[in-house]
Amino acid sequence: MPILETIGLEKRFGGITANHDVNLAVEKGARHALIGPNGAGKTTLINMLTGVLKPSAGRIMLEGRDITETAPHERVRLGMARTFQINQLFLDLTPLESVGLVVSERLGSGADWWRVVGTKASVTDEIVEIIERFRLTDVMLERTAILPYGKQRLLEIALAFACRPHVLLLDEPAAGVPEAERHELLATIEALPAEVTVLLIEHDMDLVFSFADRISVLVNGGLFVDGAPEEVARDPRVKAVYLGEELDA
Amino acid sequence: MTAPADNVSAYLRSRARWSPLEIAFWVFAFATIWLFPGKYLILKDTAILALFALSLDLILGYAGIISLGQAAFFGFAGYFAGLIAKYGIVTEPVLALILSGLVAAALGFVTSFLVLRGSDLTRLMVTLGVSLMLGEVANRYSDLTGGADGLQGVDIQPVFGRFRFDLYGHNGYVYCLIVLFVCFVLARRIVYSPFGLSLRSVKGNPLRASAIGIPVKWRLVAIYTVSAGFAGIAGGLLTQTTAFCSLDVFSLERSADLLLVLIIGGTGYLYGGLIGAVIYKFLQDWIANLTPQYWQFWIGLVLVALVLIGRDRMQGWIDAVRASLSRLGTRLLPRSAALGGAASDGGAER
């Protein structure tokens, strides 16, 4: 059984159909990439998966459970977290506070209004582990607003990871990261634990082909091709509509 | 625990530690009881305004909810405190005050669902509307509330059966100051808790807050309810210390003054309401003595100047003072400096 599955998913904005009949299956532990030209409906799809947008038709299943009607914050608790294409961070907080917030929220003390943050050893240990994994240790006490872009991008993923998702949706994680900071980011994404299923939405073909073990191509709102990277790269239709330039070059 | 974990833990705890500046602030606040015996009335009004402003800071500074209707809770609890004293339902003032806070919180809980919908402008209008409606209800049921004449015949018993509210306002001021302090400690506890941190995240980025599993709506309902409770306690204090309650507790001016206080004092660090209240009250008093007729002109001028200079620049002055004070503190207290140093060096070691 796929860990994340969509059945006939569709989204219309008035007369415009952004997604139609999307049947996507992401297997447990996969490194699944979702690619497609601009305007193919990738972001709409991820917004439906995470609950920001309500589908016009179809269903979304997470670990066999129908989550089509579930509120966004509930989906996080059920094991699906996302990052954003454009950073959505808490600019006034430090990375330490941001990660601490997510961890204490997940451990169920988010509504605790009496205890001081950071007095539970289990919480602090986990915060440290995540801060180190995402290479944020030397900036953990800086205000997020003044961090270099690459670090902000790492924090963007760290916050989603701190939710301990079973499925992690990465929406163009490498977008806009300068060359010098890129390597650190990619290495961190490579090092994500194998048991976390990753669905990667990305424009960058180098990243997609080095990282993914399965690729789905979205064109004009529908799933076009779905398969292993070699198959997708060989597929003449994909070459024609999308990969043509990159492969010829 | 590993070394960085110790650092992290120490840093997180240090966020919530009482700084010397804060301790000095409260020592001075309580010292005013002996320092300014002739000024009890204005001091008492200041303490009530400070508590009232603290209630607004909780929602504005920590959750980003702007409101022109805090007077609704202030007034509602004010009348409640007056009525239960007048009819002898609950005569002990401290207990009556807690009850006033609770009924205001209940009103806050119910109205929070109206306020949470929509944008800032909607919120301004809805909060304003709620307080206007309550004011009109109080006016309409004048048999109970005394209408335009105000609630007469309120007899407030001594606090704990011992401390009578005297003519000079000494006990009244001490009472208000203690209540302010207790509420402040409570608010401080709340904002440094995980719940408080989650509020700041909701204020900073509601989209992301919900994407990391925070039930944004319920957090806002919770803090709005708490804030209403605090406003209610402030309203109850006013009724108890004046043994009177009139329709102006619901006035728009009262809510608007509150925003002025927070503009003067700043939001999001809890002391803004307190410092703002002190500056606002004493500025008003001082200018009103100089030019009894035109004092509002000068208050207006101060506000314009304040906004033009900008909060950031003033924050810079405050930071400079704070830095030099903490340097002084470091020399006097080497031990606490070592702790603070360990936390901030945490990253550099690696």
Image: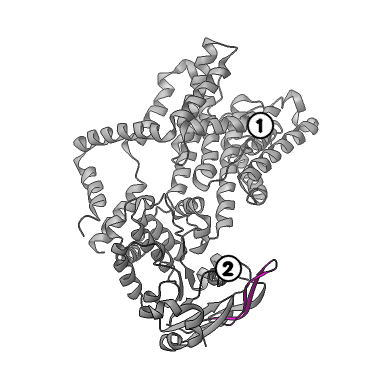
Q: Which mark is residue A51?
A: 2
Mark 1 residue element:
helix
Q: Is residue B73 left or right of residue B311?
A: right
Q: Is residue B55 visible?
A: yes
* Residue displayed at 76% across by 34% down: B136
Provide the major secondary structure of the magenta segment.
strand
Instruction: Count how many numbered circles sit on residues in the image.
Output: 2
For badge 1, the amino acid type reads: Leu
Q: Does residue B43 appear in the picture of this structure?
A: no
Report the front residue among A32 and A117.
Answer: A32
Q: Start and end of the magenta stretch?
A: A2-23
Q: Position of residue A81 (x, y in %)?
A: 48, 69
Q: Quadrant of residue A96?
A: bottom left
How many other residues sit within 10 Å of disc 1, few (<14), some (14-19) or many (≥20)?
A: many
Residue type of the residue flagged with mark 2: Gly
- How does the figure colour the protein chain or chains? one colour
Q: Is residue B33 left or right of residue B13?
A: right
Q: What is the quadrant of residue A200 in the picture?
A: bottom left
Q: Give left or right: position of A85 versus B137.
A: left
In which quadrant is the N terminus of chain B drawn? bottom left
- The question of residue A5 being in magenta is answered with yes
Give how far across and how far down residue A73 sits, in percent.
Answer: 54, 65
Judge whether residue B308 is colored magenta: no
Which labelled disc corresponds to residue B98? none
Where, quadrant-wise, is the C terminus of chain B in this rendering? bottom left
Comparing B199 with B235, the one in front is: B199
Which residue does the numbered mark 1 point to in the structure image?
B252
Disc 1: which chain?
A: B
Residue A215 in the image: above or below residue B200: below
Do the residues at pointers 2 and 1 share their chain? no
